Amino acid sequence: MTVDPRWQQQLEAPTEHFFGAFATQLAQSDGLRDGVREAVKTLVPRIDWEAYLPHVPHGILGLRAVLRLQPLLSEAGFHRALATQLHMAAHEGRRSPQNLAQVSAAKGSGHWPNLEAFIQSRRPGLAYAEAQGFDHPAEADFQRLRGLTELDMATVGHKAVVCDHLADLHERLERPKATGRRLLGLAAWVAASPEDTFWARRAAKRLGDASSVPWAPATLDAAAWESQVREICDLGLVALLDPFTARLKAGQGSGDTLAALVLAASEKQLDARRDLEGKTAWTYVYLAAVARARSADPRIWCQAAALVNLFPTDEPEERVRAARVADPDAGALTEAILDVEPALAMAHAGGLAKAGRAEAALAALAEAAVQDDPTFNHAHQVLAVAAAADLLPDLPLPAQEAMVVALAKSLANSQGSGDLGRLADRALG
């Protein structure tokens, strides 16, 4: 592994030379991969995760989103996104030096019964240390952790998402041992933080012996999905769970359930106030994690419905309406977002999706998302667009269109400063 000393120094104590050091690191053999590996290895034990509770900082988590978006981005856009996301991670609140030294030195036995016991007894520090004893963390280890967190919706579902995304990040970095232990430790730490199983317990009371949601493509029509959307968006939690669980007990498969949830999440996104755009977009991230895991447990799908239901619903006449455009265009979509023109952005996104070009719309959304300083929006923009890329293949066309239109509106309404991206562009050349 090749890591430039200047990059290591910037990770230890970032300065105004951060982007220049990253540019130097990129010039090394395998510089991008090794630079991200080093960043994860250095930063995970330094961030003061406990100080952020009940929230989870998104600096490290957003790295997976940026790598997921690479095929949709220009080379310059990808490098900018990675540089600014690493900058965000490097500037997140840090532990005291004494505490950091203790955490960095701690190493458990790497014994699964111990790790499970620390998670169940809510001892994050010991869970992190125990994970450092694993010789070579594998995908199965992250998924085993995910299994311990799937019914825990503390921090609105971050636990299962963290396990899923860090597993994928580990794979994308080609499974390095030391970095993998840090990632597994972080997943274990989050898993052991305070729990919330309220929604899972409410769902279980209604599900009875219903055991599985079959993974199958969507088969219903728009009217059938719309009736489910109205329940998810308009009813209270208790009233929602009754018809939702009844459908799952009757055998409704994942394709139709996911379609209804994404359509409902998109409606909620259209209703989101400007200050809630990013938080509302988190629903896509959770839904994508459920779909990626091919979750069959009906309680997990009920949690997803409850999460979408959690966000406020507005009256249809209060929503932004898409403008009309004769020739939908991906470049114009990006420009409309950056110019804070949600109605125009929605029109281009919807037109591209209707024409069977939803992936082109996603690429335009991604290019717009990586212009922003991720610290400004807690990386919600890149997380949401990466989630949409994950969801797209599993969705019928109406749900694809609704999702890209809602995200176009969201990105246009949540534009922040692009100064950091411009600094990164200048250093990266």
Image (cartoon, grey):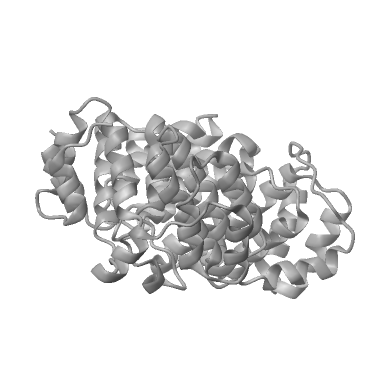
Question: Which residue shows up at 19% across the image and 28% down it?
Answer: 28
- Residue 261, compared with residue 70, is above or below; it is below
Question: Which residue shows up at 60% across the image and 34% down it?
Answer: 393
- Whether residue 300 sits left or right of residue 335 in the image: it is right
- Residue 22, compared with residue 183, is above or below; it is above
- Whether residue 145 sits left or right of residue 376 in the image: it is right
Question: Which residue shows up at 80% across the image and 43% down it?
Answer: 214
- Residue 331, compared with residue 251, is above or below; it is above
Q: Disc count in the image?
A: 0
- Whether residue 278 sits left or right of residue 34 in the image: it is right
Residue 302 % position (x, y) = 72, 61
Residue 162 % position (x, y) = 50, 54
Camera-side residue of 148 and 418: 148
| Residue 316 visible to the viewer | no
Camera-side residue of 341 and 311: 311
**Residue that sits furthest to the top in the current view:** 29
Which quadrant of the rendered structure holds the C terminus? Answer: top left
| Residue 45 visible to the viewer | yes
Which quadrant of the rendered structure holds the N terminus? Answer: top left
Camera-side residue of 310 and 42: 42
Residue 427 % position (x, y) = 11, 40
Residue 403 % position (x, y) = 54, 47
Question: Which residue shows up at 83% across the image and 55% down it?
Answer: 247
